[in-house]
Amino acid sequence: MENREEILELCSRTGCEYRENVPLCEYTSFRIGGPAAVMLFPRNAGEAAAAVRALRGKCRLFVMGKGSNLLAADEGWDGAVLMAGPNMASIEAEGETLICGAGATMAQACSAALQRGLTGLEFSWGIPGSVGGGAYMNAGAYGGEYRDVVAWCEHVDENGDIGRFSGEELEYRYRGSVYTGKRYFITRAALRLAKGDPAAIRARMDDLLARRKEKQPLEFPSAGSTFKRPEGAYAAALIEQCGLKGARVGGAVVSVKHSGFIVNAGGATCADVLALIAHVQQVVEEQTGFRLEREVQLLR
């Protein structure tokens, strides 16, 4: 950043913890990515709002969840990254609703629901992301999605104003919401659940986790499903049909365990992953007519 000193001075006024030259590979599940010029870790909505107001128009600003659906550029990010700090991970219950800080993981929310005998979140057990990220992208698996449970989301918008969307206003769709394409920083989400039998909830969570471990390449760094499900087909089935299991570019490999995943088999770069994604898209389109759309978010 040409105006680095100015940006650092602005960061110091926000109240946020912040650090310079932070390797993004340490904050992404892919374990890929060069340094971010500066990362800020707000402890509450007020600090997040202060950061957005201070930095908008001054540098590029990226809002990051837990980095589990993110591919960061090898050269890094010549701007600021805003990521929920540890203080934004609280979970409180109001009757059958969990009020979750955006930095809480989906696993923590599932555990909190289990402890209170609340059902409805079991589908997200094992998804390696944050509640904020789940609410942002309508995360889902095994027949459940975040739109089934989100009552409202609080956020800081691109102008640094704090606001809230109701469940209806979130405009949820497959892996998308009203937030898609916007630089809103989600601060809290309310998950409306229902009373259930703790033993049945635990059994369902155990079953889904076992199925994940059996079918997904959890032993390798990845960003989860690489491609969105195309209408009328399944990405993994198309990729396998085209004989692309095990296809490799550098350290990036189409998983032989689940072809819907591109994994970091060791030393993969962002360039490797993007080249492999492009190869898979080209072959699948040529052989099947389906154009696969990347689900993984790209930061560059």
Image (spheres, helix red, strand yellow):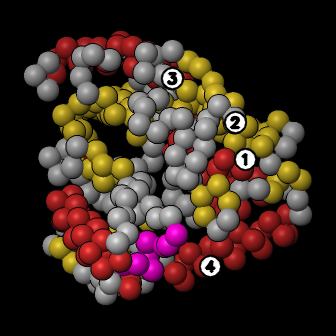
Secondary structure state at the residue bearing disc 2: loop
**Which mark is on residue 210?**
4
Q: Which quadrant would the C terminus be assigned to in this image?
A: top left
Counting residues from the start of the chain, the first of labels 3 and 4 encountered is 3
Alpha-carbon distance for marks 3 and 1?
21 Å
Secondary structure state at the residue bearing disc 1: loop
Alpha-carbon distance for marks 1 and 2?
9 Å
Instruction: Please identify the quarter of the rendering in which residue 119 is found.
Output: bottom right
Front in this rendered view, residue 103 or 64: 64
Question: Picture coordinates of residue 41 (x, y %)?
Answer: 41, 31
Counting residues from the start of the chain, the first of labels 1 and 2 encountered is 1
Residue drawn at x 45%, y 80% is 237
In the image, what residue type sits under mark 3?
Val
Alpha-carbon distance for marks 2 and 4?
31 Å
Counting residues from the start of the chain, the first of labels 2 and 4 encountered is 2
Residue drawn at x 24%, y 70% is 282
1 vs 2, front mark = 2
Above/below status of 179 relative to 113:
above
Above/below status of 265 relative to 201:
below
Range covered by the magenta-colored residues? 232-239
Q: Is residue 213 visible?
A: yes
Residue drawn at x 76%, y 56% is 120
Alpha-carbon distance for marks 1 and 4?
23 Å
In the image, what residue type sits under mark 1?
Val
Circles 1 and 4 in contact, beta carbons < 8 Å: no
Question: Picture coordinates of residue 184 (x, y %)?
Answer: 47, 29
**Which mark is on residue 156?**
3
Circles 3 and 2 in contact, beta carbons < 8 Å: no
Secondary structure state at the residue bearing disc 4: helix
In the picture of the structure, the residue carrying the numbered disc 2 is 167
